Amino acid sequence: MAQEIERKFLVSSDGWRASVRSSSQVRQGYLSSNAKATVRVRSYDDQRAVLTLKGRASGLVRAEYEYAIPVEDARELLEMAQPHVLEKRRYLVEHDGMTWEVDVFEGRHQGLVLAEIELERADQAVKLPDWVGEEVSEDERYFNATLSRS
């Protein structure tokens, strides 16, 4: 089974900016979200797009299936997902041999900055950078599907 194991943190300072490897503009919309599964469409710089199905989380682990789709299809699906669409700039940031994703939200969530790290195992040790603050991995208020509805 395909799965995602990730930890998520509030970002407490701009220290991450010194280690940015790349960034992209992300638009993501939620077509369906319930207790069992979430269906999301995401586009990167309006050049690449994916459709993602995620199962319910069990701690840090959840089923995740992701498929490349044509960008034009993503544009149409993002329109279908309105008003449950988020916009953010995603930065890939290197720290201690790992790649972090730092999301700087725009629009109605402007000012929110979250950092995520994907893991191979739920018990994997991670050296936290000094620019991360409170862990919010299991705080539903910071799930993107929840943010899309608020």
Image (cartoon, rainbow, N blue to C red):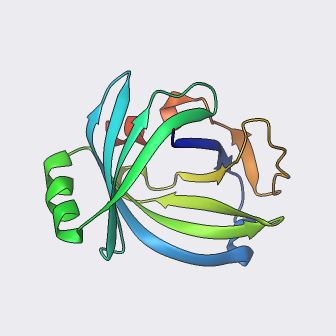
Q: Is residue 70 above or below residue 52?
A: below
Is 14 left, or right, of 92 in this rendering? right
**Residue 25 spot, x, y in % from top left:** 41, 70
- Position of residue 142 measured from the top left corner of the image (x, y, whole percent): 51, 38
Residue 82 visible in this rendered orientation of the protein: no
The quarter of the picture where residue 150 lies is top left
Residue 31 location (% of width, % of height): 23, 41
Rendered residue at 46%/42% (across/down): 64
Q: Is residue 57 visible?
A: yes
**Vertical placement of residue 55 versus 27, above or below:** above
Q: Residue at x 52, y 51 (%)?
A: 112
Most foreground residue, 52 or 20:
52
Q: Which residue is more in the foreground, 21 or 88?
A: 21
Q: Quadrant of residue 83?
A: top left
**Along the horizontal axis of the image, is 150 left or right of 83?**
right
Which residue does the image show at 79% across and 36% down from the upper left?
Answer: 123
